[in-house]
Image (cartoon, helix red, strand yellow):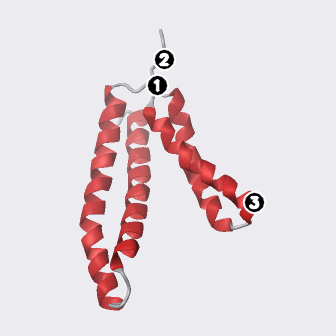
């Protein structure tokens, strides 16, 4: 049987940005290695339960980002009225949603492996 392609493995592509550390010497790029975790999903068969846990984690992360973005814009505007609040709010809300997605998806997978679902 042919193994289906799992698109979630493509989330590992931002890990390639860590290679920019070598020509620049900027250690900020090393943080992109966290995306290398998603390489393992190229070998996962995306069945219905996997897609359900993926959908649950993505929904939670999306709702967090939508709720956090205006709050962070307001906080940034109140703390620094002269600065543009959009890049600050977009960056922090996006980072928070990625972290929540990764942690929640990992927790759901752990529950699935333990048979708690």
Tell me if I can see residue 117 in this picture.
no
Pointer 1 residue? 5
Placement of the C terminus among the 4 image quadrants: top left
Pointer 2 residue? 3
* Residue for point 28% across, 52% down: 60
Tell me if I can see residue 82 in this picture.
yes
Q: Residues within 10 Å of mark 3 (few under 14, many from 20)?
A: few
Question: Where's residue 47, x and y in %?
Answer: 36, 25
Q: Give the CA separation, mark 3 to mark 1.
A: 33 Å
Q: Residues within 10 Å of mark 2 (few under 14, many from 20)?
A: few
Marks 2 & 1, CB-CB < 8 Å contact: yes
* Residue for point 68% across, 66% down: 27
Instruction: Name the one closer to the observer, 63 or 27.
Output: 27
- Residue 49, disc: none
Pointer 3 residue? 23
In terms of image quadrants, where is residue 81? bottom left
Question: Where's residue 34, x and y in %?
Answer: 57, 53
Marks 3 & 1, CB-CB < 8 Å contact: no
């Amino acid at each position: 049987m042919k193994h289906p392609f799992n698109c979630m493995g493509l989330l590992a592509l931002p890990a390639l940005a860590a290679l920019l550390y070598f020509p620049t010497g900027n250690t900020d790029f090393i943080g992109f290695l966290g995306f290398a975790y998603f390489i393992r999903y190229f070998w996962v068969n995306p069945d219905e339960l996997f897609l359900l846990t993926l959908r649950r984690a993505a929904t939670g992360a999306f709702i967090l980002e939508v709720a956090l973005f205006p709050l962070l814009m307001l906080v940034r505007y109140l703390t620094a009225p002269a600065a543009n609040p959009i890049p600050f709010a977009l960056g922090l809300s996006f980072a928070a949603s990625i972290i929540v997605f990764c942690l929640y998806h990992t927790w759901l997978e752990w529950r699935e492996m333990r048979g708690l679902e």
